[in-house]
Amino acid sequence: MKLKTLLSTIALSGLTLLSASANAFFGSKDEMRLGYLVKQPEEPWFQTEWAFAEKAAKDLGFDLVKMAVPDGEKTLNAIDTLAAQGAKGFVICTPDPKLGPAIMAKAKSYDLKVVTVDDQFLNAKGEPMTDVPLVMMAATAIGERQGQELYNEMQKRGWDVTTTGVMAITADELDTARRRVDGSISALKAAGFPAGQIYRVPTKTNDIPGALDAANSLLVQYPMVKQWLIVGMNDNTVLGGVRATEGQGFTAQNIIGIGINGVDAVNELAKSQATGFYGSLLPSPDVHGYKSIASLYHWVKEGVEPSKFVEVTDVVLITRDNFKVELEKKGL
Ligand code: FCA
């Protein structure tokens, strides 16, 4: 009797397992399956894109597979997995733009459609692969805005420009990062900030620890600087810079950092005490997440080819004073 119960339990759980894996492989309602692959799932930016891709999946009725692809190997494996699961295509923010040709070759071998988001693929010659649809923020414009806002805030505080420096943490291998930082620096110069007091330092990794190391190596070279403006391609880069200045005794009084992404700065802006991280430029991760996957869906379903380039331009400066309201306005 006992053995019989045991056997039927095993049989039942076997069935459950089978149907669970069948669901995972073929979708629960014969729905179209699409992937959304991101390089840094730990960034709220990408979590927000995923959340809005989920919304599109619900609205349009497809099955979304979210995957983390922190390196090239994981990216190529993820494409194999997607194909095995019967997916028809994927949206990707690649961990490395130079993977573009390898990603496209693999995707083509399985007849998967590809839409890129945020970071553009580069071909073997290092040129942008303009044939692959791309949704991204207006990189130069948002950088220029960062430079202008930093300059405005410095003016508002009446700082002595002669003792002020710009710490620009760069990531030039990533085109969108290079364009944002260059935009910021050119706006600062155009506003009248002395070019000789703008110092660039490359970060090894695009995260807080990488930027912190880069900033530390810069700070020791310029002990005469009394106030810093911090430029970087996103919130984490600027946060790394701010943390480094704090280590040298700087505070909210003599540091102005303005990030980019907004959603990655929420914890910092919510702190009970102001820090050197003054604010962030919030673009539209909701639009990136929704539009990229929706365009892929229509491509697969109706054969409507997405635009090769969608530039999302809407940006707002969030600070400790307005971040809650501004995030709410966008449903974030
Ligand atoms: C790049 C950055 C991200 C985000 C995105 C829009 O991928 O690494 O932090 O700013 O562009």
Image (tube, rainbow, N blue to C red):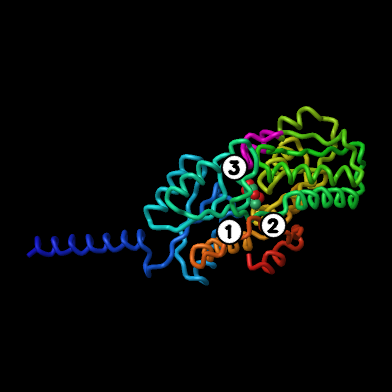
Give the residues in magenta.
202-214
Q: Image quadrant of residue 25?
A: bottom left
Residue on which the image places disc 2: 311
Neighbours of disc 1 within 10 Å: few (<14), some (14-19), many (20+):
many
- Is residue 207 magenta-colored? yes
**Mark 3–mark 2 contact, CB under 8 Å?**
no
The label nearer to you, 3 versus 1, is 3
Residue on which the image places disc 1: 49
Position above or below: 293 against 256: below
Amino acid beneath label 2: Glu
12 or 104, which lies in front?
104
**Mark 3–mark 1 contact, CB under 8 Å?**
no
Neighbours of disc 2 within 10 Å: few (<14), some (14-19), many (20+):
few
Distance of mark 3 from mark 2, alpha carbons? 18 Å
In this rendering, position of residue 267 left or right of residue 158: left
Instruction: Residue 264 in the image: state x and y as whole percent.
Output: 64, 53
- Is residue 162 magenta-colored? no
Q: Image quadrant of residue 229?
A: top right
Is ligand 1 closer than 8 angstroms to the Cβ of mark 1? no
Distance of mark 3 from mark 1, alpha carbons? 19 Å
Amino acid beneath label 3: Pro
Q: Is residue 106 visible?
A: yes
Instruction: Residue 218 in the image: state x and y as whole percent.
Output: 75, 31
In this rendering, position of residue 17 left or right of residue 206: left
Residue on which the image places disc 3: 97
> Image point 69% across, 69% down: which residue?
329
> Image point 63% across, 51% down: which residue?
118
